[in-house]
């Protein structure tokens, strides 16, 4: 469907314009990524690169990346979800390219996809080609660039306009093929990583479906048409009404069916995540770290859409300002990235221009934009946190932090209103002036978003990225040369694991509850000394029991600690670059530690009686020699899905010290093997197989019926 007053361009013109601008804008906003640079800051090096490095290494060696043994004492890698282990673009890119190139391409391609998807939806809703271009610019580059420190934002958010486009075609045109495509599209959005924006997409699709089915267009009949309708019997009218209701509910059932099918197809991701949630801090509430209200939009910060210079000019102080008590703000912390909402100044004027005509309009375009406005208003109210007391206990709403992420709906609505505003405005302009003025508005808005995205963000582009140096890490080289697997106590949380070395402490959004239990975690450091320069007796005891073999610090180890033996100091090419640090690092060996495996009651015998045969992500093989029946401790996390055998026979896996694995071993020589095979992963695999099978069968059946119907009509 095209604009009411503007004829649509040829298909080749549309695609040439759309793709050229989609790619060109990524070159403007992300040129360093195209040239081999990268992002640094925020969670990029402490969360996403550690995950992607492990995934890339596992794919290159043919291992199953089901469990990540490098972060802390290990965690369910698939269940955590943000790595997107089974997301096809991620698997393909990280198998074909180096780590940095794959990360950049995944980022850039989804920006192109989001722009194209928004163009398709805006054209379907009736915006002109220029209006669609402006709407796509506002949606994609108004909301996503400041959130580039959250990799999943663009990877999953790009599917919102795409899924709404498919749904609109299904509802408006009864297009069965668009309907069938909704299932794999939803599955891809769920497989891509974080589920929050997928949940928001589902809410939008539910509202969109209800609107189109139960708020139909009212035909405005002429007097002659009305007179023709009068003689119709009441029985016929009742029958027509009943048929309409049946048709609507049938279509609603089909929409629900393809959505459920999408969940089935994503089962290989959803079930492992559900299993992890049952064992996570989200379920046990042992940590105050998870607060669903964190990341809200303070109401006074809404003024950023009109007077951005009042806020963005002092971005360094913005976080503190947003966390000050303010009128109507809820009592929870937030940050500038989560709370960001900006449409551009010129688009804002067009939004104001379109507001009244869209509110009064009777065209299908205006009706659709009114629905988007309702969804956008809901997103804004939820972003304030005001609806949390009502909706916060419902499934989905209670699972995620960041209420301000619902402004994704607000930005989509604003973007389309801006596009509609241009369509209404340009009709008043001379034909020769309209293209020139549009180019000026579009160009100034690009510059506007560029200025904002460089100030409101936690991640920045650099022409030379440290990630390309990860294979040159001196710390990793030394630890990989050890005869047994090492575990490092290091700053930067997960960052060191990029090198392939296990490290603690951990940083996980959703993770095993043990990592958030104050009784089991590293005793807090209150000394204020540089990392690695001060340790209490309790901290040393924790490190030894946790199997930490080495300590990496920003300062030499304290001379009073005989347990710490300095082994190296200097500049690590990768770690120093990643931390932006010019001073040397200090590596020490920790004596008296259990290491990665030890006897519970006599750890001093470990060196001669426990030999490592194999250590991989999903299996561990040890050869042990016990002089008497003993308890073998493996200082990896005890978690559902890990099974142990002794000499090939199943044994009971015990939990020691609240979180580590242990098994009873009789005297003599034995082969001990731990293997990871969680039921949720197996069940999820078969659920996905079932979903794809049903989907394929449905498409084949639908195609056959379509063919038979065509042949019948021709006869």
Image: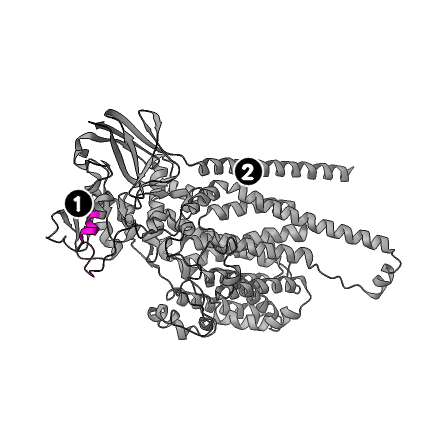
Asked whether residue 378 is drawn in magenta, I would say no
Residue designated by label 1: 590
Q: Which mark is residue 692?
A: 2
Q: Secondary structure at mark 2?
A: helix
Q: Quadrant of the N terminus?
A: bottom right
Looking at this view, is 451 or 206 the one in front? 206
Q: Is residue 541 above or below residue 481?
A: below
**Residue 674 visible, this angle:** yes
| Name of the residue lying farthest toward the right | 231
- As drawn, 341 above or below 485: below
- Whole-percent x and y of residue 225? 83, 61
SS under mark 1: strand
Which one is closest to the eye, mark 2 or mark 1?
Answer: 1
Location of residue 95 (image quadrant): top left
Specify whether 606 is left or right of 324.
left
Q: Position of residue 351 (x, y in %)?
A: 55, 70
Q: Quick one: label 1, few (<14), some, or many (20+) residues within 10 Å?
A: many
Q: Residues within 10 Å of mark 2 (few under 14, many from 20)?
A: some
Q: Is residue 586 left or right of residue 30?
A: left
Callout 2–callout 1 Cβ contact below 8 Å: no
Task: Name the one closer to the observer, 199 or 519.
Answer: 519
Q: Quadrant of residue 414?
A: bottom right
Residue 531 belongs to magenta span: yes
Q: Give residue 129's position: percent from left, percent from top.
A: 58, 61
CA gap between label 2 and label 1 equals: 51 Å
* Among the two numbered marks 2 and 1 on one chain, the one whose residue lies closer to the N terminus: 1
- The magenta stretch spans which residues? 525-541
Most frequent secondary structure within the magenta stretch:
loop
Q: Residue at x 10, y 52 (%)?
A: 559
């Amino acid at each position: 469907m095209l604009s009411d007053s503007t004829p649509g361009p040829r298909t080749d013109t549309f695609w040439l314009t759309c793709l050229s601008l989609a790619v060109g804008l990524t070159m403007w906003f992300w040129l360093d990524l195209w040239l081999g640079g990268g992002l640094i800051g925020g969670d990029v090096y402490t969360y996403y690169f550690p995950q992607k490095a492990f995934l890339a290494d596992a794919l290159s060696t043919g291992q199953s990346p089901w469990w990540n043994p490098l972060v802390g004492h290990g965690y369910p890698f698939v269940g955590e979800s943000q790595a997107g282990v089974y997301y096809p673009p991620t698997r393909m890119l990280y198998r074909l390219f180096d780590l940095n190139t794959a990360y950049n391409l995944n980022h850039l391609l989804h920006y192109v996809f989001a722009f194209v998807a928004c163009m398709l939806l805006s054209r379907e809703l009736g915006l002109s080609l220029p209006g669609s271009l402006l709407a796509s610019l506002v949606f994609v580059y108004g909301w996503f660039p400041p959130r580039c420190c959250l990799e999943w934002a663009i990877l999953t958010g790009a599917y919102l306009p795409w899924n709404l486009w498919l749904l609109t075609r299904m509802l408006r045109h009864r297009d069965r093929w668009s309907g069938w495509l909704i299932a794999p599209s939803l599955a891809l959005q769920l497989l891509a990583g974080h589920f929050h924006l997928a949940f928001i997409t589902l809410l939008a699709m539910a509202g969109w479906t209800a609107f189109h089915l139960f708020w139909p267009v009212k035909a405005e009949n002429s007097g002659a048409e009305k007179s023709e309708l009068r003689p119709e019997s009441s029985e016929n009218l009742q029958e027509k009404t009943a048929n309409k209701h049946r048709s609507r509910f049938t279509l609603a059932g089909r929409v629900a069916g393809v959505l459920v099918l999408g969940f089935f197809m994503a089962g290989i991701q959803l079930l492992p995540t559900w299993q992890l949630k049952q064992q996570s801090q989200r379920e046990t509430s042992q940590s105050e770290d998870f607060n669903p209200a964190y990341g809200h939009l303070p109401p006074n910060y809404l003024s950023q859409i009109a007077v951005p210079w009042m806020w963005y000019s002092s971005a360094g102080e913005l976080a503190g300002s947003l966390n000050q008590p303010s009128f109507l703000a809820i009592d929870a912390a937030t940050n500038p990235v989560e709370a960001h909402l900006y449409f551009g100044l010129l688009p804002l004027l067009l939004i104001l221009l379109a507001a009244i005509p869209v509110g009064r309009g009777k065209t299908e375009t205006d009706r659709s934009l009114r629905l988007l406005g309702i969804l956008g208003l809901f997103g804004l109210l939820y972003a304030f946190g005001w609806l949390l007391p009502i909706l916060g206990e419902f499934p989905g709403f209670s699972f995620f932090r960041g209420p301000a992420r619902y402004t994704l709906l607000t930005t989509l609505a604003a973007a389309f209103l801006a596009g509609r505003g241009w369509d209404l405005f340009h009709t008043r302009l001379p034909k020769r002036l309209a293209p020139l003025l549009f180019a000026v508005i579009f160009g100034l808005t690009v510059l506007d978003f560029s200025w904002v995205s460089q100030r409101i963000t936690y991640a920045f582009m650099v022409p030379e990225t440290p990630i390309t140096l990860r294979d040159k890490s001196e710390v990793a080289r030394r630890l990989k040369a050890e005869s047994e697997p090492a575990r490092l106590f290091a700053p930067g949380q997960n960052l060191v694991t990029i090198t392939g070395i296990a490290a603690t402490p951990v940083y996980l959004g959703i993770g095993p509850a043990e990592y958030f239990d104050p009784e089991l975690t590293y005793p807090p450091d209150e000394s204020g000394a540089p990392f690695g320069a001060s340790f209490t007796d309790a901290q040393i005891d924790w490190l030894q029991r946790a199997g930490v073999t080495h300590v990496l610090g920003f300062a030499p180890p304290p001379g009073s600690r005989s347990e710490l033996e300095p082994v190296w100091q200097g500049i690590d090419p990768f770690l120093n670059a990643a931390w932006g640090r010019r001073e040397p690092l200090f590596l020490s060996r920790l004596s008296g530690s259990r290491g990665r495996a030890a006897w519970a009651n006599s750890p001093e015998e470990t060196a001669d009686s426990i030999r490592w045969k194999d250590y991989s992500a999903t299996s561990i093989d040890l050869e042990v020699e016990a002089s008497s029946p003993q308890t073998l401790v493996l200082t990896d996390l005890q978690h559902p899905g890990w099974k142990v055998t002794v000499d090939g026979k199943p044994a009971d896996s015990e939990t020691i010290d609240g979180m580590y694995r242990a098994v009873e071993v009789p005297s003599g020589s034995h082969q001990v093997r731990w293997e990871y095979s969680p039921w949720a992963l197996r069940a999820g695999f078969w659920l996905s197989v079932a979903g794809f099978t049903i989907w394929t069968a449905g498409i084949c059946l639908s195609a056959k019926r379509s063919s038979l119907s065509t042949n019948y009509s021709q006869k």
